[in-house]
Amino acid sequence: MRRRIVVAILAIAVTAPIGKIRGQESESTVSAADGVKLRFEVLAQPQASSTSVDSVVESDVELRRARLTAEGQVGERWSGRIQMDFETERARFRDAYLEGRVSDGLSLRAGQFKVPFNGIELESAKRLLAIERGARVRGTPIASTSTSGMLAATAMDARNRGIMALLRWADGRARVQAGGWVGAGERGENNDGKQLAARLEFEPWAGSESRAPLVLALAVVSNGYFGSPRDTLIVAQGDTTVTEDASYATAFEAWVEFGRYAAPGLHVAGNMIAGDNPLAPRIGNGDVEFAGFLGMQVWGEYVLRGTGPLTGIGIGGRVDHFDPDTDVEENAYVLWTPLVNLYFGNVFKLQANLDVLSPESDEREQESALRVQAQLVL
Protein backbone atom coordinates (compact mmCIF):
# COMPACT_ATOMS: atom_id res chain seq x y z
CA MET A 1 0.00 0.00 0.00
CA ARG A 2 2.80 2.40 0.91
CA ARG A 3 4.47 1.69 -2.44
CA ARG A 4 1.28 2.70 -4.29
CA ILE A 5 1.10 5.96 -2.33
CA VAL A 6 4.73 6.76 -3.12
CA VAL A 7 4.22 6.06 -6.84
CA ALA A 8 1.14 8.29 -6.89
CA ILE A 9 2.96 11.17 -5.24
CA LEU A 10 5.88 10.92 -7.65
CA ALA A 11 3.53 10.77 -10.61
CA ILE A 12 1.81 13.97 -9.51
CA ALA A 13 5.17 15.72 -9.06
CA VAL A 14 6.49 14.63 -12.46
CA THR A 15 3.38 15.71 -14.36
CA ALA A 16 3.38 19.13 -12.70
CA PRO A 17 5.42 21.91 -14.36
CA ILE A 18 8.98 21.75 -13.06
CA GLY A 19 10.36 24.81 -11.28
CA LYS A 20 13.80 26.10 -10.44
CA ILE A 21 15.01 24.48 -7.25
CA ARG A 22 18.64 25.04 -6.23
CA GLY A 23 20.33 25.39 -9.58
CA GLN A 24 17.87 24.15 -12.17
CA GLU A 25 17.54 26.40 -15.20
CA SER A 26 13.80 26.28 -15.86
CA GLU A 27 11.61 28.72 -13.96
CA SER A 28 8.05 27.54 -14.59
CA THR A 29 5.84 27.50 -11.49
CA VAL A 30 2.54 26.08 -10.33
CA SER A 31 0.11 28.48 -8.69
CA ALA A 32 -1.83 26.66 -5.98
CA ALA A 33 -3.84 29.72 -4.95
CA ASP A 34 -3.79 33.46 -5.35
CA GLY A 35 -0.46 34.78 -4.19
CA VAL A 36 1.02 31.30 -3.61
CA LYS A 37 3.80 29.84 -5.76
CA LEU A 38 4.89 26.20 -5.58
CA ARG A 39 7.93 24.47 -7.07
CA PHE A 40 8.40 20.70 -7.15
CA GLU A 41 11.44 18.48 -7.57
CA VAL A 42 11.93 14.72 -7.77
CA LEU A 43 15.34 13.18 -6.97
CA ALA A 44 16.37 9.55 -7.45
CA GLN A 45 19.82 8.11 -6.73
CA PRO A 46 20.24 4.38 -7.41
CA GLN A 47 23.63 3.11 -6.24
CA ALA A 48 25.73 -0.04 -6.62
CA SER A 49 28.71 -0.74 -4.38
CA SER A 50 31.20 -3.39 -3.38
CA THR A 51 33.22 -3.85 -0.18
CA SER A 52 36.42 -5.62 0.75
CA VAL A 53 35.14 -6.50 4.25
CA ASP A 54 34.75 -10.29 4.48
CA SER A 55 31.99 -10.27 7.13
CA VAL A 56 29.37 -8.63 4.87
CA VAL A 57 28.02 -9.25 1.38
CA GLU A 58 30.54 -8.33 -1.28
CA SER A 59 28.20 -6.33 -3.54
CA ASP A 60 24.88 -4.55 -3.15
CA VAL A 61 22.44 -2.39 -5.12
CA GLU A 62 20.21 0.12 -3.34
CA LEU A 63 18.02 3.12 -3.97
CA ARG A 64 20.20 5.49 -1.95
CA ARG A 65 17.71 8.36 -2.10
CA ALA A 66 14.24 8.92 -3.53
CA ARG A 67 12.99 12.36 -2.59
CA LEU A 68 10.11 14.66 -3.35
CA THR A 69 10.68 18.33 -2.52
CA ALA A 70 8.14 21.14 -2.53
CA GLU A 71 9.16 24.77 -2.05
CA GLY A 72 6.58 27.51 -1.73
CA GLN A 73 6.36 31.26 -1.44
CA VAL A 74 3.48 33.42 -0.21
CA GLY A 75 3.79 37.06 -1.11
CA GLU A 76 7.13 38.78 -0.55
CA ARG A 77 7.80 37.72 3.03
CA TRP A 78 6.87 34.07 3.58
CA SER A 79 8.43 30.95 2.12
CA GLY A 80 8.83 27.32 3.12
CA ARG A 81 10.13 23.92 2.15
CA ILE A 82 8.98 20.32 2.66
CA GLN A 83 11.10 17.37 1.63
CA MET A 84 9.99 13.74 1.83
CA ASP A 85 12.50 10.88 1.66
CA PHE A 86 11.22 7.45 0.59
CA GLU A 87 13.67 4.85 1.91
CA THR A 88 13.61 1.07 1.62
CA GLU A 89 12.06 0.56 5.06
CA ARG A 90 10.26 3.85 5.69
CA ALA A 91 9.17 7.26 4.46
CA ARG A 92 10.06 10.34 6.49
CA PHE A 93 10.24 14.12 6.42
CA ARG A 94 13.76 15.53 6.00
CA ASP A 95 13.12 19.28 5.63
CA ALA A 96 9.99 20.94 6.97
CA TYR A 97 10.33 24.63 7.76
CA LEU A 98 8.79 28.07 7.37
CA GLU A 99 10.88 31.19 6.74
CA GLY A 100 9.77 34.77 7.21
CA ARG A 101 11.59 37.88 5.95
CA VAL A 102 11.77 40.52 8.69
CA SER A 103 13.66 43.05 6.56
CA ASP A 104 15.76 43.14 3.41
CA GLY A 105 18.73 41.60 5.21
CA LEU A 106 17.13 39.57 7.99
CA SER A 107 15.04 36.39 7.91
CA LEU A 108 13.88 33.89 10.54
CA ARG A 109 13.49 30.16 9.91
CA ALA A 110 11.65 27.66 12.13
CA GLY A 111 11.10 23.92 11.79
CA GLN A 112 13.40 21.06 10.79
CA PHE A 113 16.44 21.94 8.66
CA LYS A 114 20.23 21.66 8.60
CA VAL A 115 22.34 23.14 11.39
CA PRO A 116 24.86 25.61 9.85
CA PHE A 117 27.96 23.53 10.60
CA ASN A 118 30.26 21.44 8.37
CA GLY A 119 30.19 22.80 4.82
CA ILE A 120 30.30 19.28 3.37
CA GLU A 121 27.05 18.42 5.14
CA LEU A 122 25.43 21.73 4.18
CA GLU A 123 25.85 20.96 0.48
CA SER A 124 22.84 19.25 -1.07
CA ALA A 125 23.20 15.51 -1.67
CA LYS A 126 22.55 16.08 -5.37
CA ARG A 127 25.55 18.45 -5.66
CA LEU A 128 28.20 16.36 -3.88
CA LEU A 129 31.44 15.80 -5.76
CA ALA A 130 31.97 12.45 -4.02
CA ILE A 131 29.03 10.06 -3.75
CA GLU A 132 29.12 9.78 0.06
CA ARG A 133 30.02 12.40 2.67
CA GLY A 134 31.67 9.87 4.99
CA ALA A 135 33.47 6.52 4.92
CA ARG A 136 30.38 4.45 4.07
CA VAL A 137 32.29 1.24 3.40
CA ARG A 138 29.95 -1.59 4.38
CA GLY A 139 31.31 -3.50 7.36
CA THR A 140 33.23 -0.54 8.84
CA PRO A 141 31.97 1.93 11.51
CA ILE A 142 31.28 5.19 9.68
CA ALA A 143 30.95 7.23 12.89
CA SER A 144 34.51 6.53 14.04
CA THR A 145 36.31 6.54 10.69
CA SER A 146 35.34 9.82 8.98
CA THR A 147 34.75 13.44 9.94
CA SER A 148 31.27 13.88 8.49
CA GLY A 149 30.27 10.42 9.71
CA MET A 150 31.00 11.30 13.33
CA LEU A 151 29.35 14.73 13.15
CA ALA A 152 26.14 13.30 11.69
CA ALA A 153 26.03 10.38 14.14
CA THR A 154 26.26 12.78 17.10
CA ALA A 155 23.77 15.31 15.64
CA MET A 156 26.41 18.05 15.74
CA ASP A 157 25.49 18.78 12.12
CA ALA A 158 22.81 17.63 9.64
CA ARG A 159 19.11 18.22 10.26
CA ASN A 160 17.60 19.25 13.54
CA ARG A 161 14.47 21.00 14.86
CA GLY A 162 14.82 24.60 15.95
CA ILE A 163 14.81 28.27 15.00
CA MET A 164 17.52 30.25 13.18
CA ALA A 165 18.18 33.83 12.13
CA LEU A 166 19.73 34.53 8.72
CA LEU A 167 21.44 37.91 8.31
CA ARG A 168 22.94 39.30 5.08
CA TRP A 169 24.73 42.58 4.48
CA ALA A 170 27.37 44.21 2.23
CA ASP A 171 25.33 43.30 -0.88
CA GLY A 172 25.28 39.65 0.15
CA ARG A 173 29.04 39.31 0.55
CA ALA A 174 28.72 38.72 4.31
CA ARG A 175 26.24 36.24 5.78
CA VAL A 176 25.50 35.02 9.30
CA GLN A 177 23.34 32.10 10.42
CA ALA A 178 22.73 31.55 14.13
CA GLY A 179 20.13 29.70 16.14
CA GLY A 180 19.10 27.06 18.65
CA TRP A 181 17.87 23.49 18.19
CA VAL A 182 16.58 20.67 20.39
CA GLY A 183 19.82 18.79 19.69
CA ALA A 184 18.68 15.24 18.91
CA GLY A 185 18.78 15.48 15.12
CA GLU A 186 15.83 13.84 13.38
CA ARG A 187 15.35 11.50 16.34
CA GLY A 188 13.08 12.18 19.30
CA GLU A 189 14.64 14.33 22.02
CA ASN A 190 16.03 12.27 24.91
CA ASN A 191 17.65 14.84 27.23
CA ASP A 192 17.39 18.48 28.29
CA GLY A 193 20.65 19.47 26.60
CA LYS A 194 20.03 21.80 23.66
CA GLN A 195 22.09 22.86 20.67
CA LEU A 196 23.48 26.25 19.65
CA ALA A 197 25.29 26.97 16.39
CA ALA A 198 26.49 29.95 14.36
CA ARG A 199 28.18 30.39 10.99
CA LEU A 200 29.84 33.45 9.43
CA GLU A 201 30.45 33.38 5.67
CA PHE A 202 32.28 35.93 3.52
CA GLU A 203 32.18 35.91 -0.29
CA PRO A 204 34.48 38.70 -1.59
CA TRP A 205 32.95 39.02 -5.04
CA ALA A 206 29.41 37.77 -4.57
CA GLY A 207 27.20 38.38 -7.59
CA SER A 208 30.07 38.55 -10.08
CA GLU A 209 29.63 36.16 -13.00
CA SER A 210 33.08 36.90 -14.42
CA ARG A 211 34.99 35.49 -11.43
CA ALA A 212 34.84 32.05 -9.84
CA PRO A 213 33.21 32.27 -6.39
CA LEU A 214 35.34 32.21 -3.28
CA VAL A 215 33.65 31.52 0.07
CA LEU A 216 35.39 31.72 3.46
CA ALA A 217 33.59 30.65 6.63
CA LEU A 218 33.97 30.13 10.36
CA ALA A 219 31.44 28.14 12.40
CA VAL A 220 30.86 26.85 15.91
CA VAL A 221 28.41 24.33 17.38
CA SER A 222 27.69 23.12 20.92
CA ASN A 223 25.32 20.29 21.81
CA GLY A 224 24.26 18.59 25.05
CA TYR A 225 24.36 14.84 25.76
CA PHE A 226 23.23 12.54 28.60
CA GLY A 227 21.61 13.94 31.74
CA SER A 228 17.91 14.48 32.46
CA PRO A 229 14.99 13.79 32.11
CA ARG A 230 16.28 10.94 34.31
CA ASP A 231 19.70 10.37 35.81
CA THR A 232 22.01 8.66 33.35
CA LEU A 233 24.68 6.09 34.20
CA ILE A 234 27.82 6.70 32.14
CA VAL A 235 30.38 3.93 31.69
CA ALA A 236 33.64 5.05 30.10
CA GLN A 237 37.09 3.42 30.11
CA GLY A 238 36.22 1.33 33.16
CA ASP A 239 34.89 4.26 35.21
CA THR A 240 31.24 4.95 36.01
CA THR A 241 29.28 7.98 37.13
CA VAL A 242 25.69 9.14 37.35
CA THR A 243 24.95 12.52 35.77
CA GLU A 244 21.85 14.67 36.13
CA ASP A 245 22.90 17.54 33.88
CA ALA A 246 23.69 17.42 30.19
CA SER A 247 27.37 17.35 29.20
CA TYR A 248 28.17 19.73 26.34
CA ALA A 249 30.46 19.05 23.40
CA THR A 250 31.72 21.97 21.29
CA ALA A 251 33.39 22.02 17.87
CA PHE A 252 34.83 24.70 15.58
CA GLU A 253 35.14 24.81 11.78
CA ALA A 254 37.21 26.79 9.27
CA TRP A 255 35.95 26.44 5.69
CA VAL A 256 37.06 27.54 2.20
CA GLU A 257 35.47 26.89 -1.19
CA PHE A 258 36.57 28.02 -4.65
CA GLY A 259 34.70 27.53 -7.93
CA ARG A 260 31.23 26.54 -9.04
CA TYR A 261 29.57 23.14 -8.98
CA ALA A 262 29.62 21.38 -12.39
CA ALA A 263 31.03 24.50 -14.11
CA PRO A 264 34.07 24.09 -16.42
CA GLY A 265 37.30 24.53 -14.51
CA LEU A 266 38.42 23.93 -10.95
CA HIS A 267 36.06 23.46 -8.02
CA VAL A 268 37.61 22.70 -4.63
CA ALA A 269 36.31 22.86 -1.05
CA GLY A 270 37.64 21.85 2.32
CA ASN A 271 37.53 22.42 6.04
CA MET A 272 39.28 21.77 9.30
CA ILE A 273 37.09 20.84 12.27
CA ALA A 274 38.25 20.33 15.84
CA GLY A 275 36.51 19.93 19.17
CA ASP A 276 34.92 17.45 21.58
CA ASN A 277 33.95 13.96 20.43
CA PRO A 278 30.69 12.83 22.12
CA LEU A 279 31.40 9.24 21.03
CA ALA A 280 34.52 9.18 23.22
CA PRO A 281 33.41 10.09 26.77
CA ARG A 282 35.69 10.07 29.80
CA ILE A 283 35.07 10.47 33.49
CA GLY A 284 37.20 12.90 35.47
CA ASN A 285 36.51 14.04 39.04
CA GLY A 286 33.01 12.62 38.80
CA ASP A 287 32.16 14.62 35.68
CA VAL A 288 31.74 13.51 32.08
CA GLU A 289 34.43 14.79 29.73
CA PHE A 290 34.91 14.26 26.01
CA ALA A 291 38.02 13.33 24.06
CA GLY A 292 39.21 15.85 21.50
CA PHE A 293 38.92 15.09 17.77
CA LEU A 294 40.45 16.57 14.63
CA GLY A 295 39.04 16.25 11.12
CA MET A 296 40.31 17.61 7.80
CA GLN A 297 38.33 17.23 4.57
CA VAL A 298 39.33 18.30 1.04
CA TRP A 299 37.08 17.71 -1.97
CA GLY A 300 37.87 18.79 -5.52
CA GLU A 301 37.41 18.19 -9.22
CA TYR A 302 38.35 19.74 -12.54
CA VAL A 303 35.49 19.79 -15.04
CA LEU A 304 36.17 19.50 -18.76
CA ARG A 305 33.57 20.64 -21.27
CA GLY A 306 31.65 17.84 -22.89
CA THR A 307 29.84 17.57 -26.21
CA GLY A 308 26.25 16.82 -27.06
CA PRO A 309 24.19 15.57 -24.11
CA LEU A 310 27.39 15.10 -22.07
CA THR A 311 27.92 18.64 -20.80
CA GLY A 312 30.88 18.02 -18.50
CA ILE A 313 33.46 15.48 -17.35
CA GLY A 314 34.72 15.94 -13.80
CA ILE A 315 37.93 14.29 -12.59
CA GLY A 316 39.02 14.71 -8.99
CA GLY A 317 39.18 13.24 -5.54
CA ARG A 318 38.53 13.50 -1.83
CA VAL A 319 40.82 13.18 1.19
CA ASP A 320 39.35 12.93 4.69
CA HIS A 321 41.69 12.63 7.68
CA PHE A 322 39.86 11.89 10.93
CA ASP A 323 41.38 11.45 14.38
CA PRO A 324 38.61 10.55 16.87
CA ASP A 325 40.85 11.01 19.92
CA THR A 326 43.91 13.24 19.59
CA ASP A 327 45.33 11.92 22.89
CA VAL A 328 45.55 8.36 21.60
CA GLU A 329 48.28 7.37 19.17
CA GLU A 330 47.68 5.56 15.88
CA ASN A 331 43.88 5.65 15.92
CA ALA A 332 43.29 8.00 12.97
CA TYR A 333 41.84 7.08 9.57
CA VAL A 334 42.41 8.51 6.11
CA LEU A 335 39.73 8.13 3.44
CA TRP A 336 41.05 8.45 -0.12
CA THR A 337 38.54 8.73 -2.98
CA PRO A 338 39.52 9.14 -6.64
CA LEU A 339 36.37 10.06 -8.55
CA VAL A 340 34.86 10.64 -11.98
CA ASN A 341 31.63 12.58 -12.56
CA LEU A 342 29.73 12.70 -15.86
CA TYR A 343 27.27 15.58 -16.13
CA PHE A 344 24.31 15.53 -18.51
CA GLY A 345 22.92 19.02 -17.97
CA ASN A 346 21.06 19.56 -14.72
CA VAL A 347 18.93 16.44 -15.07
CA PHE A 348 21.26 13.44 -15.06
CA LYS A 349 24.63 12.66 -13.45
CA LEU A 350 26.69 9.48 -13.35
CA GLN A 351 29.37 9.09 -10.65
CA ALA A 352 32.11 6.52 -9.98
CA ASN A 353 34.18 6.44 -6.76
CA LEU A 354 36.83 4.20 -5.29
CA ASP A 355 36.78 4.66 -1.51
CA VAL A 356 39.97 3.49 0.23
CA LEU A 357 39.88 3.61 4.04
CA SER A 358 43.39 3.48 5.50
CA PRO A 359 43.90 3.13 9.27
CA GLU A 360 46.93 4.69 10.90
CA SER A 361 47.45 1.60 13.07
CA ASP A 362 49.14 -1.46 11.59
CA GLU A 363 46.79 -3.63 13.64
CA ARG A 364 43.82 -2.65 11.45
CA GLU A 365 43.38 -3.60 7.82
CA GLN A 366 42.85 -1.25 4.92
CA GLU A 367 39.38 -1.58 3.40
CA SER A 368 37.92 -0.33 0.13
CA ALA A 369 34.70 0.00 -1.82
CA LEU A 370 33.95 0.61 -5.48
CA ARG A 371 30.82 2.75 -5.80
CA VAL A 372 28.73 3.80 -8.82
CA GLN A 373 25.70 6.05 -8.59
CA ALA A 374 23.27 7.51 -11.10
CA GLN A 375 21.29 10.64 -10.31
CA LEU A 376 18.05 11.84 -11.88
CA VAL A 377 16.59 15.25 -11.03
CA LEU A 378 13.23 16.34 -12.44
Image (cartoon, grey):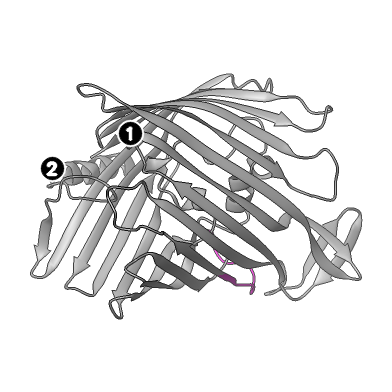
Instruction: Tell me the residue that label 2 is attached to.
Output: 15
State whether residue 166 is above or below residue 371.
below
Name the quadrant containing residue 196: bottom right
What amino acid is at disc 1? Pro
Name the side, left or right, on which 16 lies relative to 363: left
Name the quadrant containing residue 37: bottom left
Residue, far bottom: 102
Viewer-proximal residue among 73 and 173: 173
Badge 1 crowding class, 10 Å Cα cut-off, few under 14, some 14 to 19, many 20 or more, is some
For numbered disc 2, what is the local secondary structure?
helix
For numbered disc 1, what is the local secondary structure?
loop
| Quadrant of the image containing the C terminus | top left
State whether residue 212 is above or below residue 29.
above
Viewer-proximal residue among 17 and 198: 198
Instruction: Quote the CA–CA distance across marks 1 and 2.
Output: 32 Å
Name the side, left or right, on which 368 lies relative to 37: right
Question: Percent from the top left, x then y, of residue 299?
Answer: 52, 39
Question: Percent from the top left, x then y, of residue 123?
Answer: 43, 49
Instruction: Tell me the residue that label 1 is attached to.
Output: 264
Name the quadrant containing residue 290: bottom right
State whether residue 281 is above or below residue 49.
below
| Quadrant of the image containing the N terminus | top left
Q: Which residues are magenta?
A: 187-196
- What residue sits 89% from the left and 66% below the top? 284
